[in-house]
Image: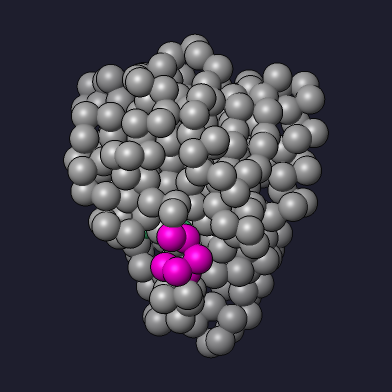
Amino acid sequence: MKKKDLLTLFEYSAEEIGGILDLAAKLKEGRGVYELKALEGKTGVLIFEKPSLRTRVSFETAIYELGGHPINLPQESVGMGKRESVEDVARNLDRIVHLIVARTFAHDTLTRLATSCSIPVINALTDLAHPCQALAFGQTLQEVRPGEKLNITFVGDGNNVCSSIMVLCAKLGHRFTHTGPKGYEPRADLVSKCKEICATSGGDISLTTDPNAAVKAADVVYTDVWASMGQEAETEKRKQDFRGYQVNAELMAKAQSDAIVSHCLPAHRGEEITSEVLDSKACVAYAEAENRLHVQKAVIVHLFS
Ligand code: CP
Ligand code: NVA
């Protein structure tokens, strides 16, 4: 049987995503009681080229709670692509462990890992995509607005998180709007692919530079940092470019009166989002952070079933 990975979410059907979200809800509800030991006797390796709090801790915990053993490998110790080739790292791990969870800069590094081994590879964030974050967002939506088709507005950089949220929305039939300054839209090829998916899912994708118009019908407002990991040198330029795109109380007042707000975290308080909004009742970012654990357990069970 061909092994399955989680690389971008594009490779998952709406049914598969729905199944993962349902299982995640069950695992959350039954944590400590209803546990699936999908990784009994198995080892999962985490390779991180970038810093992480949530992803690393939630994956280590997920692997442990599924009966497996997690090994964390920081890039300095592996030297993937430096000490030895990406393909050789994959070929070696393939013979020893059962799962690879990788956070890389280039998305190509992740796909090269995946195509060079016979064990499942999970994207723990690349410059292109953060599918686990999008799934945790999906689980959070199921909890707070179950069964609804929603207007979801992403305010800010059309980055990895934005792109994966857009894919999730397209797959599940939500209406997705991106607003950000010109030149910071999600990648055009990803937008086109999502629009194609929407033709059958009933979702919609739109892009605008006008943040006020973008949030007007929003049930959900989402944001992320303006400068992602690896873009630190552009921080000051981006702060200028993104002026007017802060998620603050004034912007939230223009959204639907019951709108919720989320952020993948870590947040730069006072930049892309104010503390007032992040600490408000409308904010589901911390619930979403917790859901990383449950949804990643569900993904692993799915990959090993
Ligand atoms: N949201 C998220 O992926 O957080 P970390 O970078 O801390 O893992
Ligand atoms: N876009 C951010 C997300 C961090 C979880 C980054 O890539 O740094």
Q: Residue at x 54, y 61 (%)?
A: 126
Q: Main secondary structure of the magenta part?
A: helix
Highlighted range, magenta:
238-243
- Which percent across, then down, holds residue 123? 53, 53
Give the image location of residue 225, x and y in percent. 41, 58
Q: Nearer the viewer, residue 289 or 281?
A: 281
* Front residue of 267 and 214: 214
Left-right relation of 54 to 304: left
Seen as rendered, the residue at the extreme top is 147
Q: Residue furthest bottom?
A: 83
Front position in the image: 296 or 87: 296
Total numbered labels? 0
Residue 264 position (above or below residue 253): below
The answer to whether residue 261 is magenta is no
Q: Residue at x 44, y 52 (%)?
A: 245
Give the quadrant of residue 284: top left
The image quadrant of residue 258 is: top left
Residue 36 seen in render:
no
Which part of the image, by quadrant, shows the N terminus? top right
* Residue in view at x 55 percent, y 17 percent: 149
* Residue occupying the point 48% across, 34% down: 215
Quarter of the image with the C terminus in it: top right
Is 134 located above or below residue 53 in the figure?
A: above
Q: Is residue 247 visible?
A: yes
Q: Is residue 191 left or right of residue 40?
A: right
Residue 300: x and y in percent read 47, 39
